[in-house]
C-alpha cells in the first residue's frame, strides 16, 4: 500500500509528517514585552544623561537688604 503525500509509515500505520514550526510571538509574549518596557520607563526611566543639572545652590545674600 503506497504512503499518501505528506505522510510517512511508522511500524504498521501511517502518520502525518510534522509541520515546519513557525516562530511566532504569542499575544502573551507581546503583552509581557510591552509591560517590561513600561515598567522600565516607569521605575528606571528613559532619562537623557546629556542634560546638565545644577547641584550647587544659588549664592546667599551676604548683606541684609537696605530699607
Image (tube, rainbow, N blue to C red):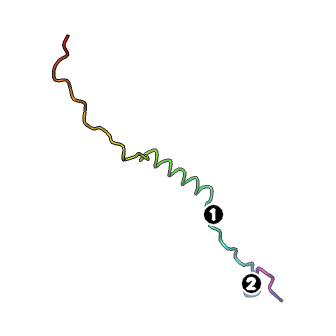
Q: Name, please, the residue furthest toward the bottom.
A: 1
What label sits on residue 24 in the rendered view? 1
* Rendered position, 35 above or below 61: below
Left or right of 50 in this view: 10: right
Q: Quadrant of residue 9?
A: bottom right
What label sits on residue 8 in the rendered view? 2
Which of 31/67 is in front?
67
What label sits on residue 40 in the rendered view? none
Which of 18/15 is in front?
18
Please name the residue shown 27% across and 38% down the image.
55
Q: Name, please, the residue furthest toward the left.
A: 63
Span colored in magenta: 3-7
Picture coordinates of residue 53, whole percent (x, y): 32, 40
Q: Quadrant of residue 22?
A: bottom right
| Magenta stretch: dominant secondary structure | loop
* Rendered position, 6 above or below 47: below
Q: Secondary structure at mark 1?
A: loop
| Label 2 Cα neighbours within 10 Å, binned few <14 / some 14-19 / many ≥20 | some
| Label 1 Cα neighbours within 10 Å, binned few <14 / some 14-19 / many ≥20 | few
Can you tell which of label 2 and label 1 is closer to the viewer? 1
Residue 38: say if magenta.
Answer: no
Picture coordinates of residue 51, whole percent (x, y): 36, 43
Picture coordinates of residue 67, whole percent (x, y): 20, 10
Marks 2 and 1, how far apart at CA: 27 Å
Q: Check if mark 2's residue and mark 1's residue have beta carbons within 8 Å.
A: no
Amino acid at each position: 500500500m503506497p504512503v499518501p503525500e505528506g505522510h510517512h509509515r511508522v511500524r504498521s500505520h501511517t502518520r502525518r509528517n510534522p509541520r515546519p514550526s513557525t516562530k511566532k510571538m504569542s499575544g502573551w509574549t507581546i503583552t509581557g514585552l510591552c509591560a517590561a518596557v513600561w515598567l522600565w520607563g516607569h521605575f528606571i526611566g528613559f532619562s537623557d544623561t546629556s542634560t546638565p543639572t545644577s547641584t550647587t545652590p544659588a549664592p546667599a545674600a551676604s548683606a541684609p537688604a537696605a530699607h
